[in-house]
Image: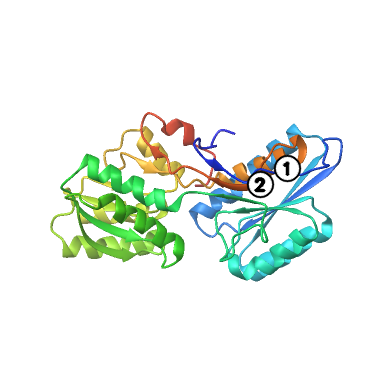
Amino acid sequence: MKNLVMGATLLAATSLAGVTQAQALTVGVSIPAADHGWTAGIVYHAERVAEKLMEEYDDLNVIVKTSPDPASQANAVQDLAVQGIDALVILPTDPDPLVNAIMQVKMEGTFVTLVDRAPSNNDNSVRDLYVAGNNPALGAVAGEYIAETTPDAKVVVIRGLPIPIDQQRQDGFDAALEGTNVEVMEKQFGNWNRDDAFRVTQDYLTKYPEIDVIWAQDDDMVVGVLQAIQQAGRDDIQYVIGGAGSKDMIKKVMDGDPMIPVDVLYPPAMIGTAMELTVAGMIDQVPVAGSYILDATLVTPENAENYYFPDSPY
């Protein structure tokens, strides 16, 4: 498991009793369609790990289905249940509208692993295992790096969407800068979209004659940020920090690009982690239920190769 991030927390241990490797087992994997970079990475890693697991276990079948919206995903989950699955691994397009479909599968005795996007009632009535990145830490790690590296920096922030995980990231960032001399001049939403981030950066560059650091919260947005900086010919920005671990940003870190000295992981490979843990519980009967939260690792030139997937679309 190349991209398993160490230091995760595994709670409430249990196992899938009565399952043996001799049985033919089926795992259904329901994920969003590749509508932007991060979800393209989710699709890539789901298909990659599905193939690897089926090569490793002769009696295992893994079915991966992608869906563009909650209604389509609810139908996909129902289709998987009709086909007959022993476990469901699901990263919801939007969790709350999918709760009923997920709970229906769980009530039929299927082991359910929920990935990343949690519904309002994220408890064992909905899922057996929860696998996710650490959103507060994603912001905190970026903030800590800025405070340590450029302690008097003037910073502008490009947030994602006005939803809970964005707020968690922003809260972590703000907490890390409390009591420091770092000045956060403004925050705007970039909608985790490179074109929107490009426009927000243009606005910042027009408003502020001096900017030291831009925190863009997401690697897709960093693409737009860098384009705006280059187009404006600005040389005062010392560096940009994104997050998620896209292959392009990881490569820039590996190559020592001064504009992208580090990145913060929120890896799409977490879908593979969820699939491997689920299969380990089914076949090897290791304790896997509860919550498994991946570290928001700071990617540096020293460790970047561990998180670089050159064949991934993201």
Front one among 234 and 50: 50
Q: Quadrant of residue 105?
A: bottom right
Task: For mark 2, give the secondary structure.
Answer: loop
Which residue sits at x=41%, y=68%?
Answer: 162
Q: Nearer the viewer, residue 225 or 94?
A: 94
| Left or right of 129 on screen, residue 173 | left
Q: How many marks?
A: 2
Q: In the image, is 244 to the left or to the right of 61?
A: left
- Residue annotated with mark 1: 15
Residue receiving disc 2 = 289
Q: Give residue 166's position: percent from left, percent from top.
A: 41, 61
Q: Which residue is the extreme one toward the top? A: 302
Indicate the position of residue 60 as horizontal and vertical percent values.
79, 40
Which residue shows up at 77% across the image and 58% down it?
80
Label 1 close to label 2 by CB (< 8 Å):
yes
Amino acid tagged 2: Ala
In the image, taking residue 179 as reference, residue 137 lies left or right, namely right
